[in-house]
Image: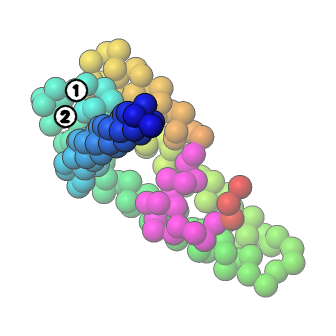
């Protein structure tokens, strides 16, 4: 009976210690991750170990690029709306719809080119090794997941068929 009590108490103490440790670690992680929720560039500092000067330069580049990005995303959203109208109630792809598809493709290509140029510029504001790693990742994301970015930036989330 005495041995059972020792095992039960030891298990209870160990369980309490594990719970308390997990709780304190999760609290610390939450504070670190959410200390500045409005800073959408904080991940750059953490991931690429950037200095305050690097971050200030990158922040200026980012703020300068955002109006261009928003403008391009608005153009793409408008062209997508035009395409939807051209496709509406048609059982065949009309010449107008084909033209809208080509125009949409051209806008997307222009957007990707602008984004890639911005990423090159940002990568050049980083230490060389980190800049190359950043650029490689941004190329992968930009060329692979551009549709998701368009949906997010245009505010047109949920209207596209998911693949």
Q: Position of residue 113 (x, y in %)?
A: 48, 41
Precedes in sequence: disc 2 or disc 1: 1
What residue is at 49 percent from the left and 53 percent from the top?
149
Number of numbered labels in the structure image: 2
Q: Which residue is mark 1?
A: 50
**Badge 2: how crowded within 10 Å, few (<14), some, or many (20+)?**
some
What residue is at 87 percent from the left and 78 percent from the top?
91
What separation in Å lies between label 2 and label 1 (alpha carbons)? 6 Å
Whether residue 27 sits left or right of residue 103 in the image: it is left
Asked whether the beta carbons under mark 2 and mark 1 sit within 8 Å of each other, the answer is yes
Q: How is the image coloured?
A: rainbow
What residue span does the magenta drawing correspond to? 145-160
Q: Residue furthest left?
A: 53
Query: 73 and 59: which one is in front?
Result: 59
Residue 149 belongs to magenta span? yes
As helix, strand or loop, the secondary structure at mark 1 comes to: loop
Query: 35 and 139: which one is in front?
Result: 35
Q: Quadrant of residue 21?
A: top left
Query: 161 and 73: which one is in front?
Result: 161
Q: Position of residue 90 (x, y in %)?
A: 82, 80
What residue is at 67 percent from the left and 80 percent from the top?
85
Q: In this view of the protein, can residue 162 be seen by the observer?
A: yes
Q: Position of residue 125 (x, y in %)?
A: 25, 26
Q: Which mark is residue 55?
A: 2
Whether residue 147 sits left or right of residue 64 in the image: it is right
**Quadrant of the image containing the N terminus:** top left
Q: Residue furthest top?
A: 129
């Amino acid at each position: 009976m005495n041995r059972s009590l020792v095992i039960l108490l030891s298990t209870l103490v160990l369980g309490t210690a594990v719970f308390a440790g997990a709780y304190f670690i999760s609290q610390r992680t939450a504070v670190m991750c959410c200390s500045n929720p409005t800073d959408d560039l904080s991940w750059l500092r953490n991931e690429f170990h950037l200095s305050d000067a690097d971050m200030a330069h990158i922040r200026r580049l980012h703020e300068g690029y955002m109006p261009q990005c928003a403008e391009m995303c608005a153009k793409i959203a408008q062209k997508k709306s035009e395409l939807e109208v051209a496709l509406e109630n048609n059982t065949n792809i009309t010449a107008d719809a084909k033209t809208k598809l080509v125009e949409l493709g051209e806008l997307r290509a222009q957007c990707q080119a602008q984004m890639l140029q911005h990423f090159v510029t940002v990568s050049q504001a980083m230490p060389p090794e980190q800049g190359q790693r950043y650029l490689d990742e941004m190329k992968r994301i930009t060329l692979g997941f551009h549709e998701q970015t368009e949906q997010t930036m245009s505010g047109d989330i949920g209207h596209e068929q998911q693949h």
